[in-house]
Amino acid sequence: MKYRILGRTGLRVSAVGLGTMVHAGHFGPMDDRESLSAIETAMDLGVNFIDTSDAYGAGYSETLLGQALRGKRDKIVLATKGGNVMVGPDRGKRNFTPDYIERVMDESLKRLQTDYVDLYQLHNPTVDVIERGDVWEVLERAKKAGKIRHYGVSINTIEEGIVAVNDGRSDAVQLEYNLLAQEPAEKIFPLAQKANVGIIARVPLRRGILTGKLTAADDGRFQGEDVRARSFKGEPFRRELEKAEQLRFLVDRNIQTFAQAAIAFCLAHPAVSTTIPGARNAQQMRENAAGADVTIPPEHLQRLDELWHGSLSS
Ligand SMILES: NC(=O)c1ccc[n+]([C@@H]2O[C@H](COP(=O)([O-])OP(=O)(O)OC[C@H]3O[C@@H](n4cnc5c(N)ncnc54)[C@H](OP(=O)(O)O)[C@@H]3O)[C@@H](O)[C@H]2O)c1
């Protein structure tokens, strides 16, 4: 495994990390034994950055991770998030009030069976929360109390990312960045590099589209609570598959799988400290971790750039 520094946090993180949303059943039903084998395999391979949230399965992912990390906590750079209400009458709303974040942070620590997390992220805060929220004082207090080592945000829009970096309080920004979502490279990464803000590139496999395993036959296959239920159908899904098809040239003698090419793409940008593909089992984890060992050749990066400014962005 290769390691990079997560911006001004100074944390040494594996270039390929692990996202644990899948372990809470957001990509269809999960078997805990498979989730635990993915986490164990990650650690065996030197993956030390693991990302979760209290929102994944309303705490389920954190609880499972807490079990998996028993006795190994100090080997992991652990990141979680708070701010999305997952139970009770406000389920589905966001809450970044100081009292709420103070409470859910303690609950996360309990589920994770640890006294501290290395990175606490506000989970999808709005521009208003980032700029004017009084939640930051809570985070600073928690840092002084040793409950969190660093704090940052996980954001959805380019505007939120720019505001978070410019605001100056986030030591790290987590955002979607992949072959089909390259906007941050132009609009956020240069600012982040200047401010030494760590970038965590999430959804590197575009939820499976960039593994090459999905086809038109999967249109509408994902149902219910599956995160793919809304977007993996109809015209938008067909367009995504078409775009992915144009990227198959990345698989060649040096890069053997599409997933590894997608991961290598994220790591090709020096602003990215780590990328956090989800892995449902040990086999996926092994394939994803090996993405840190391959490099996209310059001529392919050049072709990617042309595609991004052409047919990929239309
Ligand atoms: N707002 C936020 O803060 C936010 C939002 C989204 C994600 N995240 C974070 O980012 C992480 C990653 O995002 P994600 O899990 O949504 O998307 P992703 O990493 O792009 O895709 C993960 C999914 O792709 C499939 N997959 C993974 N490795 C594979 C391989 N080697 N071969 C074939 N299929 C493979 C698995 O699903 P199947 O096996 O079912 O196909 C897996 O669940 C999350 O776990 C979470 O930590 C944060």
Image (cartoon, rainbow, N blue to C red):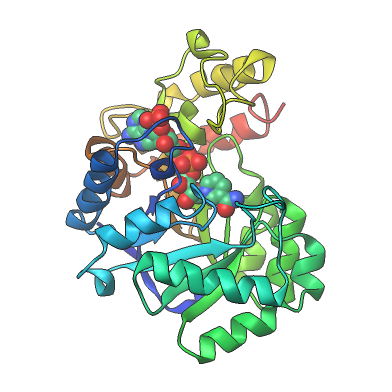
Outermost residue, left side: 44
Residue 62 placed where, x, y %?
41, 58
Residue 254 versus residue 87: which sits nearer the camera? Answer: 87
Outermost residue, front side: 88
Residue 226 placed where, x, y %?
53, 30
User: Do we see residue 299 in this rendering?
Assistant: no
* For residue 280, side relative to residue 162 (left or right): left
Residue 281 versus residue 44: which sits nearer the camera? Answer: 281
**Residue 6, above or below 144:** above
Residue 10 versus residue 149: which sits nearer the camera? Answer: 149
What residue is at 40 percent from the left and 64 percent from the top? 111
* For residue 235, side relative to residue 266 (left or right): right
**Residue 312, above or below 88:** above
Q: Quadrant of residue 35?
A: top left
* For residue 152, side relative to residue 29 (left or right): right
User: Do we see residue 257 in this rendering?
Assistant: yes
**Residue 282, above or below 2:** above
Quadrant housing the N terminus:
bottom left
Quadrant housing the C terminus:
top right
Q: Splitting the image into four quadrants, where does ligand 1 fall?
A: top left
What residue is at 64 percent from the left and 62 percent from the top? 83
* For residue 39, side relative to residue 228 (left or right): left
Outermost residue, bottom side: 144
Q: What is the count of numbered marks? A: 0
Residue 268 placed where, x, y %?
45, 50
Residue 207 placed where, x, y %?
49, 34
